[in-house]
């Protein structure tokens, strides 16, 4: 857990204004659908910050920030991978390619996206719904 949550100016300096806008927009879309615990952490060796959405000890997804780069990660367990495979044709070719190229570890398939705009957000929300049904009335 970070002791100090990064300010808007720190995030803007780190990501650049266009990517910070993408970050804020993605958080907003997630927040509209999910009531989750959110926590800031250091991003480990590859990222400056991690912003994690969790509930009941289970992680929904994480956003990552480093210099001029946003990462959005969803980890799919075995059952979730089966659900994705059953509906993969309904996802964009880009999402299918990133999914297919992602590494599978003992605890699941770690799928990392690098959104530069909002074009994949509808796919992202459908991927999140595979992990957990939205728990907010829209």
Image (spheres, rainbow, N blue to C red):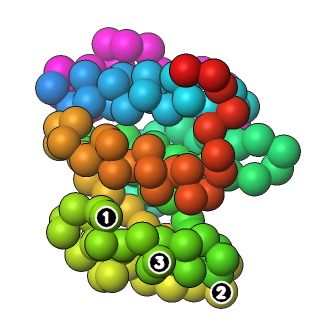
Magenta run includes residue 11: yes
Residue 93 position within the rendered picture, expressed as x and y whole percent measured from the top left: 18, 69
Mark 2, other Cα within 10 Å: few <14 / some 14–19 / many ≥20: few
Label 3 CA crowd tier, 10 Å (few <14, some 14–19, many 20+)? few
> For the magenta stretch, what is the residue range?
1-17
Disc 2 to disc 3, C-alpha distance: 21 Å
Q: Is residue 111 above or below residue 7?
A: below
Quadrant in the picture for residue 24: top left
* Residue 76: percent from left, percent from top: 57, 69
- Judged from this view, the residue extending furthest toward the right is 56
The residue to which callout 1 is attached is: 90
- Give the residue displayed 26% in from the left and 30% down from the top: 22
Going from N to C along the chain, the mark reached first, 1 or 2, is: 1
Q: CA distance from mark 3 to mark 1?
A: 9 Å
Residue lying at 44% horizontally and 22% vertically, measured from the top left: 28
Residue 134 lies in magenta, yes or no?
Answer: no
Helix or strand or loop: what does disc 2 sit on?
Answer: loop
Question: Which element is circle 1 on?
Answer: helix
Query: Can you give x and y, in whole percent of width and height, for residue 32 in the image?
Result: 52, 23
User: Looking at the image, is mark 2 or mark 3 nearer the viewer?
Assistant: 3
Q: What mark, if any, has residue 86 been given in the picture?
A: 3
Q: Are marks 2 and 3 in contact (CB under 8 Å)?
A: no
């Amino acid at each position: 857990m970070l002791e100090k949550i990064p300010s808007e100016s720190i995030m803007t300096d780190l990501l650049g204004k266009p990517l910070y806008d993408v970050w804020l927009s993605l958080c907003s879309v997630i927040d509209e659908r999910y009531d989750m615990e959110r926590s800031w952490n250091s991003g480990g060796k590859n990222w400056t910050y991690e912003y994690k959405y969790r509930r009941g000890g289970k992680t929904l997804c994480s956003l990552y920030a480093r210099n001029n780069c946003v990462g959005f990660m969803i980890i799919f367990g075995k059952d979730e991978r089966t659900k994705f495979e059953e509906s993969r044709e309904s996802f964009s070719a880009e999402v299918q390619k990133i999914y297919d190229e992602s590494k599978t570890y003992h605890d699941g398939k770690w799928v990392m996206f690098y959104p530069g705009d909002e074009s994949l957000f509808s796919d992202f929300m459908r991927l999140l719904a595979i992990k957990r049904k939205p728990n907010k009335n829209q």
